[in-house]
Amino acid sequence: MADIINLADICKGKSYQVSGFTESSTEYAEKLSKMGFVVGTAVALAPVKLNDPMVLQIRGSRVALRKSEAAQILVEEKKDA
């Protein structure tokens, strides 16, 4: 089983998938779900030179999140098959 980490801790050049939220019953978790952060969805850092906010590529779009917001999203690294 892959290690589950916070989205705020991901590395450039690797691909991850959403595993859930630190607190899934919050209004903010619901908002993130509506933005495309759904369990199983691929997510990666966009090739942009920003640290905070983070720019993420998800579902063909780019989304900027503060690291404090990204820390609420749990991800696991995708393994190449």
Image (cartoon, grey):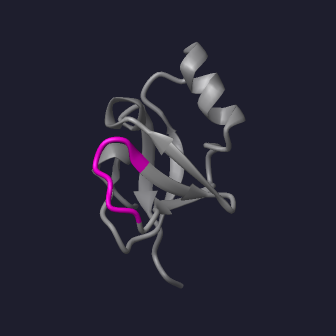
Residue 49 is inside the magenta segment: yes
| Residue 15 coordinates in the image, percent (x, y) | 46, 68
Q: From the viewer's perspective, is residue 56 above or below residue 28?
A: below
Q: Picture quarter containing residue 65?
A: top left
Residue lying at the far bottom of the rendered structure:
81
Q: Nearer the viewer, residue 61 or 59?
A: 61
Q: Nearer the viewer, residue 6 or 63?
A: 63
Can the viewer see residue 33?
Answer: yes
Q: Picture quarter containing residue 10?
A: bottom left
Q: What segment is highlighted magenta in the picture?
A: 48-54
Residue 37 is inside the magenta segment: no
Q: Picture quarter containing residue 59?
A: bottom right
Residue lying at the far front of the rendered structure:
49
Q: Measuring 33% from the left and 44% from the top, which residue is drawn there? A: 8
Q: From the viewer's perspective, is residue 51 above or below residue 13?
A: above
| Residue 46 coordinates in the image, percent (x, y) | 46, 63
Q: Measuring 49% from the left and 54% from the top, which residue is drawn there? A: 56
- State the predominant SS element of the stretch in magenta: loop
Q: Where the N terminus falls, by quadrant?
A: bottom left
Q: Nearer the viewer, residue 26 or 58?
A: 58
Q: Measuring 41% from the left and 38% from the top, which residue is drawn there? A: 70
Q: Nearer the viewer, residue 15 or 39?
A: 15
Can the viewer see residue 25?
Answer: no
| Residue 14 coordinates in the image, percent (x, y) | 39, 71
| Residue 67 coordinates in the image, percent (x, y) | 33, 37
Give the number of callouts.
0
Q: Measuring 43% from the left and 42% from the top, which residue is drawn there? A: 74
